[in-house]
Image (cartoon, grey):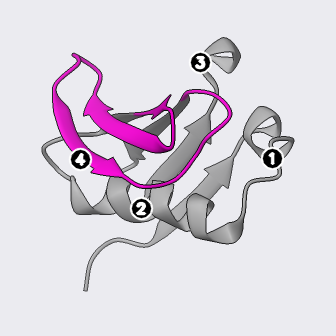
Amino acid sequence: MGKPIQKVATRGVQNMNLPPAVMNLFFQKAESFLPKHEFLVFEPQGNRIAVSDGDGKRLDEQQMTLPEKVWVKTDDYGDSLVITALLPREY
């Protein structure tokens, strides 16, 4: 069994009122790319979302819309992980 994971969305992401399926996608992708990628970018591209690492390397693509770019950052606190979805302007 892995470490407990806390999933957090900032006010900016919460105010986007995204469907639960989109929020779940953020957190599932973050978990699936650990430990290699602790930072993901979800960037809207028309009716698709490009998922990349912080250096612009494309990791995945999803068929859905997103009103603006969302970052998902994972912090390892030793005995637990915290995955945070935030807007770039909230950093």
> Could you tell me which secondary element the residue under label 4 belongs to?
strand
> Could you tell me which secondary element the residue under label 3 belongs to?
helix
Give the mark nearer the N terminus: 4 vs 2.
4
Pointer 4 residue: 60
What amino acid type should be assigned to the residue bearing mark 1? Gln
**Location of residue 73 with respect to 76 vertically, above or below:** above
Determine the CA span between mark 3 and mark 1.
14 Å
Residue 81 location (% of width, % of height): 42, 56
Residue drawn 58% across the image and 60% down it: 22
Determine the CA span between mark 1 and mark 2.
23 Å
> Could you tell me which secondary element the residue under label 1 belongs to?
helix
Quadrant of res 69 = top right
Which region shows up in magenta?
42-69
Pointer 1 residue: 14
Looking at the image, residue 71 sits to the left or right of residue 41; the answer is: right
Looking at the image, residue 87 sits to the left or right of residue 5; the answer is: right
Pointer 3 residue: 88
Query: Mark 1 Cα within 10 Å, few/some/many (few <14, many 20+)?
Result: few
Q: Nearer the viewer, mark 2 or mark 3?
A: 3
Looking at the image, residue 18 sits to the left or right of residue 85; the answer is: right
Contact (Cβ within 8 Å) of mark 1 with mark 2:
no
Residue 70 location (% of width, % of height): 55, 33
Pointer 2 residue: 80
Q: Residue furthest front?
A: 46
Contact (Cβ within 8 Å) of mark 2 with mark 3:
no
Query: Mark 3 Cα within 10 Å, few/some/many (few <14, many 20+)?
Result: few
Count of all numbered marks drawn on residues in the image? 4
Give the mark nearer the N terminus: 1 vs 2.
1
Residue drawn 29% across the image and 21% down it: 54
| Residue closer to the observer: 16 or 75 | 16
Residue drawn 54% across the image and 67% down it: 24
